[in-house]
Image (cartoon, rainbow, N blue to C red):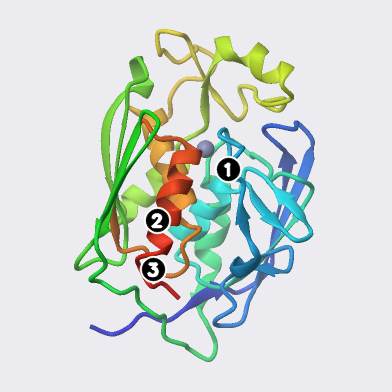
Amino acid sequence: MMTPARRTITRPLAFEGRTLHLGEPGAVVLMPAEAGAGWTLNGWSRAAWEHDDDAPLATSVVTPSGRVSTVEHLWAALALADIDDVHVTVDGAEVPILEGSAWEFLRALEPSACDSAPVTARSPWQSDWPGVALDVGAAHLTARPRAGSTWPLLEVASSWPGVAGGRLVVDLSEAGTRSRLARARTFGLVSTLPRLRAAGRALGADSTCCVGLTDAGEALPETPLRFDAEPLWHKALDLLGDLAWLPGPRAVCVTALDAGHAANGRLVRALLDRVGAT
Ligand SMILES: [Zn+2]
């Protein structure tokens, strides 16, 4: 099997909008990068990133020049567009939420994705790493190598009531699955909004970017679902965005039961020790 080429983008891409948690204006610019640069954030390579474990509602990257929050949907879009090398600049402390999913990022990225020039082969993961299983509070996560594919197989399960509960398997080797995953929007229980806002969170959450759920797990009439089980698909999108901390191809089968960003982050740390990714 031929080793795939590294991929970047052909031209700069810019995004602007309000942020989910701080409710402030935010902007992102993506620039083509040389083969081997990986993903950089505000000029810092992954080697200089640290994970913020104290932010369970979003994934944050701490670089020597500051912290950037809510990166997970952008990261998921870069993974879905199969981008190895890109320079990311975020203006502000948080990536804009746009319409709540990874769709606007992916819609711009896909036509811009290209092999690096000169064409440089990607370094594959080792395929013989031992599987990982861990419990983080009530969450249970496992990961093992996926043979015969360069795409992840994700299984998420949630004990939330209604449309946000149940079990879902997402095979990203299917292109149609990738676009559906990208379109799944952020969601939240409307009854928790006052508490979150009192804590300075979810200040930008509204019906333009968030599916509101009742305590019974039903979508509010003003935020109807785009498709069945959209909140579970969004759990899988967040998981992919969190896995994107791992460089290179992600030929992995992951199960995540009742897991959020903090638990996903623990899984990624365990994986980084095992997969020998470059
Ligand atoms: Zn999310």
Classify residue 212 as left or right of residue 49: left
Depth order, front residue of 82/167 = 167
In the rendered image, is residue 255 in sight? Answer: no
The residue type indicated by label 3 comes to: Pro
Classify residue 83 as left or right of residue 136: right
Q: Are marks 2 and 3 in contact (CB under 8 Å)?
A: no
* Quadrant showing the C terminus: bottom left
Q: Residue at x 36, y 80 (%)?
A: 4
The residue type indicated by label 2 comes to: Ala
The residue indicated by pointer 2 is 270
Q: Is 262 situated above or below 206?
A: below
Q: Is 209 situated above or below 91?
A: above
Residue 129 percent across, percent down from the top left: 26, 67
Does the Cβ of the disc 2 residue fall within 8 Å of ligand 1?
Answer: no
**Cα–Cα span, label 3 and label 1:** 24 Å
Q: Nearer the viewer, mark 3 or mark 1?
A: 1
The residue indicated by pointer 1 is 53
The residue type indicated by label 1 comes to: Asp
Which quarter of the figure has residue 117? bottom right
**Cα–Cα span, label 2 and label 3:** 17 Å
Q: Nearer the viewer, mark 2 or mark 3?
A: 2
Question: Which class describes the residues within 10 Å of circle 3: few (<14), some (14-19), or many (20+)?
Answer: many
Q: Residue at x 59, y 66 (%)?
A: 46
